[in-house]
Amino acid sequence: MIELYYWPTPNGHKVTLFLEETGLPYAIKPVNIGRGDQFEPAFLAISPNNRMPAIVDTEPKDGQGPLSVFESGAILQYLADKTGKFLPTNARARYAVLEWVYWQVGGLGPMLGQNHHFNRYAAEKIPYAIDRYVNETRRLYGVLDKRLDGRQFIAGDDYTIADMAAYPWIVPHEAQGMDLADFPHLKAWYDRIAARPATLRAYAAGEPLRSQQLDLSKDEEARKVLFGQGAKALG
């Protein structure tokens, strides 16, 4: 059983995409990030960076008791290795997938996250910051669009964890100021993934929690929890 510490955000959706594709048994453990659940000692014990998602595998391959993993990219790689799915074993093919997973966790996610922050959540609208991150979002969309020219999926003809890592960050494209019509190869890829039955199930899994999501543009307390963290928050 995989215990998934989760909230319905792009990084959370990455993991449910994988779990629904493979049918691996899992149980969602909600982490309401707008109310500070990520600072609870029990959660910090498995995710010391106070970020979700995180998992606990109650039946790891080594048979040595529950194993926890934090960081969404590491979780995808762990689950792929555990199941033998969505990550090739051949070295060349494997690293073609992993380099794009790392591209997502090191670039696409953080830059689009800043786009979301300055466009939607920042109390003060700073034109320079908005332009900076919208332009970087457009550049990264262009990188992905070019990569998908002539390919069904990011690493080739097969759907992999690279696609699962990137797709949830493209879902809120309108909020990022992007029009998928400007990126035809990316749009075709997006539509292919959106139509997958497992994708529909993965997003449905988060629906019961959506009613508890907070409007960060209006909820000052939630903004303080999410954006006012310092070293003392981990004490």
Image (tube, helix red, strand yellow):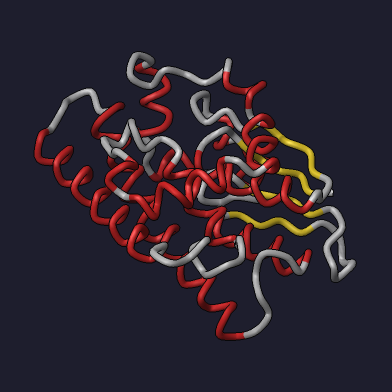
Residue situated furthest bottom in the rendering: 91
Q: Nearer the viewer, residue 122 or 137?
A: 137
Q: Quadrant of residue 117?
A: top left
Q: Residue at 52%, 54% (x, y): give it.
A: 165
Whether residue 157 is visible, yes or no, is yes
Is residue 99 depicted above or below 203 in this figure?
Answer: below
Q: Residue at 56%, 41% (x, y): give it.
A: 194
In the rendered structure, the answer to whether residue 102 lies left or right of residue 28 reads left
User: Where does residue 152 sit, x and y in percent of width and height?
Assistant: 52, 61
Q: Nearer the viewer, residue 123 or 169?
A: 169
Is residue 40 depicted above or below 111 in this figure?
Answer: above
Q: Residue at 16%, 27% (x, y): give it.
A: 125
Q: Quadrant of residue 122?
A: top left
In the rendered structure, the answer to whether residue 16 lies left or right of residue 173 reads right
Residue situated furthest right in the rendering: 63
Is residue 158 depicted above or below 128 in this figure?
Answer: below
The total number of labels drawn is 0
Whether residue 101 is visible, yes or no, is no
User: Where does residue 187 sit, x and y in percent of width and height?
Assistant: 41, 47
Q: Nearer the viewer, residue 106 or 108?
A: 108
